[in-house]
Amino acid sequence: MSNQNPVEIDAASGEVTEYTPAGKPARYRCPLDSMSDIKREMAKIYREARSGLVDVQDATKLTWCLQAVAKVIEGSDLEKRIEALENQK
């Protein structure tokens, strides 16, 4: 049985260490560390949906995910502020 997908081979042992599926899309990366990063990404998704580059249903799902990330960032910032206030006493 032959494998048509490219693989990674460990140089020391000669064994296959990872299968790389053919046709796998490149991983999308963007910073999501601050509220302005989230805002920028939401605006990008909105523009892509308005332009027809992204399906509106997909854009809605992505925006919901970004809203969840924003809530986590907000909670983390509040936690840091409370901790700083408590340490001042």
Image (tube, rainbow, N blue to C red):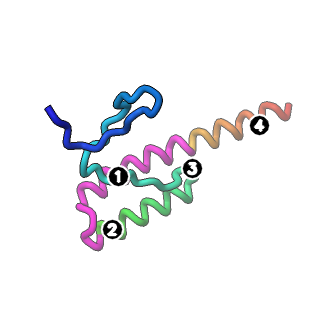
Residue 55, picture quadrant: bottom left
Which residue is denoted by mark 4 in the rendering?
A: 84
Calculate the distance from the C-alpha at mark 3 to the C-alpha at mark 2.
22 Å
Reply above or below: 82 against 74: above
Name the front one of labels 2 and 4. Answer: 2
Residue 16 in the image, given as x and y percentages of width and height: 34, 31
Q: Which residue is mark 2?
A: 48
* Dot 2 or dot 4, earlier in sequence: 2
Q: Secondary structure at mark 2?
A: helix
Q: Nearer the viewer, mark 1 or mark 4?
A: 1
- Report the residue at 45% width, 53% height from top: 29
Numbered disc total: 4
What distance separates the C-alpha of mark 3 from that of mark 1? 16 Å
Q: Which residues are magenta?
A: 50-73
Q: Which residue is mark 3?
A: 33
Q: Which mark is residue 62?
A: 1
